[in-house]
Each structure stands twice: as structure tokens, then as C-alpha cells.
Image: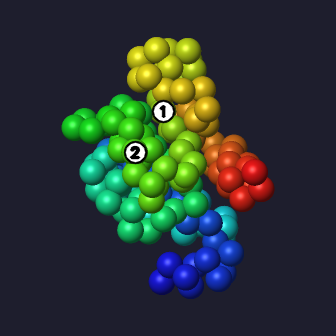
Amino acid sequence: MTDEYREMNLKKVLLIDDEEFFCRALKKNLELKNEFQVLTATRGDEGIRLAKAEQPDVILLDIMMPGMSGTEVTDELLADPVTRSIPIIYVTAIINEDDIKKGAGISSGKALIAKPVKIDELVKKINAVCQVVNNP
């Protein structure tokens, strides 16, 4: 199934967020654009497992999650050669980027998008991040 989606030129997106309703809604809205295959995980450890198994083009990652935070997920992904090059877009309800950096230890090299998510803005950000990765 993975190769089938890539042959159709769909970008594979992994969404890791503890809010199930948000995952379902964002998955549906992104897939309606006919540009994306969206996989979801509601726990950090599940997201890491999916990232290793599925090798998505981009990861959308919530910062504030119970159990394993978004920064802890990022640390594990960056430590693994299989997942370290997958771009991450942080999806957060925290609006101020300085607050995010201070509170979550996020480097400025990562992309951010605020909740509530504007689908068209997210699509542009996903496409931009994927283009940078594919054309370094």
C-alpha cells in the first residue's frame, strides 16, 4: 500500500496528536485535497513506531501530549538514522513561538502551525517543507 500511494504522487503525512477528534478531522480535510495519505497516532510511542515503519514524507506533531511530549518524540526520531531526516511540523495551541521554544526546547529549525489549523495554510507549509527536503 505504501508504494501504491507514492505512485499516485500522494505525500504521506503522519499526524501525532493525543486528540482523537482533531486527528480524524485533520485526516479527513487533508485527504479531501487529493494530495495526501494521512496516518494518525494518538500516542508518542505509537507515532515513533509508525514513522519507522511507514517512512512518511512529513510528520505533524503536537507539542503538548500526555505521556511522551512532542519534544521527547522529536528526540527519539532524531536519534534514529531511519527517521532523523523526516521533516517535522509542530502543531500547537501555543501561539507565541518564543514561548514554544522556551517551554518545549524546540529549535528554530522546525516549522510551526497554530491550532486551530487553517487547512490551506497547512497544505502550503507541508508542500514547502517537502520541497525543501526533496530539493536541498
Q: Residue at x 49, y 50 (%)?
A: 84
Q: Residue at x 55, y 15 (%)?
A: 98
Q: Amino acid at mark 2?
A: Ala
Q: Amino acid at mark 1?
A: Thr
Does residue 121 appear to the left or right of 92 in the view shown? right
Residue 59 vertical placement versus 4 (above, below): above
Q: Residue furthest right?
A: 135
Query: Which residue is at the front of the view, 134 or 65?
Result: 134
Residue 116 vertical placement versus 119 (above, below): above
* Mark 2 residue element: helix
**Residue 20: assigned label:** none
Point out residue 21 in the picture as x, y percentages from the top left corner: 37, 51
Q: Residue at x 40, y 45 (%)?
A: 79
Residue 132 vertical placement versus 36 (above, below): above
CA neighbours of label 1 inside 10 A, class few (<14), some (14 to 19), many (20+)? many
CA neighbours of label 2 inside 10 A, class few (<14), some (14 to 19), many (20+)? few
Please tell me whether mark 2 or mark 1 is closer to you in this view. Answer: 2
Query: Which residue is at the front of the view, 82 or 42?
Result: 82
* Mark 1 residue element: strand
**Residue 79: assigned label:** 2
Dot 1 corresponds to which residue? 92
Point out residue 124 in the picture as x, y percentages from the top left corner: 72, 49
Residue 93 vertical placement versus 34 (above, below): above
Point out residue 106 in the picture as x, y percentages from the top left corner: 49, 27
Q: Residue at x 58, y 79 (%)?
A: 5
Is any part of residue 67 visible from this angle? yes
Query: Which residue is at the front of the view, 45 or 80?
Result: 80
**Distance between the alpha carbons at the discs numbered 2 and 1:** 23 Å
Which quarter of the picture shows residue 110? top right
Is any part of residue 24 visible from this angle? no
Q: Residue furthest front?
A: 81
Point out residue 93 in the picture as x, y percentages from the top left corner: 47, 29
